[in-house]
Amino acid sequence: MKIYKPEGRCNASGIRVKEARELAGLSQEQLAAKIQLAGLSITQKAVSRIETGSRVVADYELAYLADALGVTINYLLDKE
């Protein structure tokens, strides 16, 4: 299966994840910890790869990211 990479990125949400994380004053490690406490196994390295666009983000992961960052999924997808 070929992954479509518009603008060289594997996801559409990484840039907004980084913006929201920085606005919340969280490190990548702290964000990963919040998500882990919510029940999803994710590492700081995975958060870094999401933000740089080198990792695909599953739809169910968007919900965890949005909740941990206090934003909506639409915000992460740059739709609002």
Image (tube, rainbow, N blue to C red):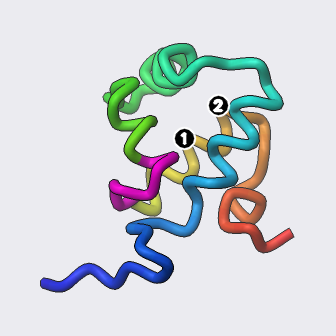
Give residue 68's position: percent from left, percent from top. 64, 31
Give residue 20's position: percent from left, percent from top. 75, 39
* Total labels drawn: 2
Whether the magenta-drawn stretch holds residue 75 is answered as no
Going 56% across and 14% down the picture, which residue do you hit?
A: 30
Q: On screen, 50 above or below 24?
A: below
Whether the magenta-drawn stretch holds residue 54 is answered as yes
Q: Which of 68 and 46 is in front in this view?
A: 46
Q: Quadrant of residue 9?
A: bottom left
Going 86% across and 69% down the picture, which residue do you hit?
A: 80
Q: Is residue 38 left or right of residue 68?
A: left
Circle 1 crowding by C-alpha within 10 Å: few under 14, some 14–19, many from 20: some
The type of residue carrying mark 1 is Tyr
Magenta portion: prevailing SS class: loop
Q: Is residue 42 left or right of residue 60?
A: left
Going 63% across and 46% down the picture, which residue do you hit?
A: 17
Distance between the alpha carbons at the discs numbered 2 and 1? 6 Å
Q: What stretch is highlighted in magenta?
A: 50-57
Disc 2: which residue: 68
Q: In which quarter of the image is residue 77?
A: bottom right
Numbered disc 1: secondary structure: helix
Give residue 14's position: percent from left, percent from top. 55, 54
Q: Is residue 55 left or right of residue 75?
A: left
The type of residue carrying mark 2 is Ala
Quadrant of the drawing holding the N terminus = bottom left
Disc 1: which residue: 64
> Is there CB contact under 8 Å for labels 2 and 1?
yes
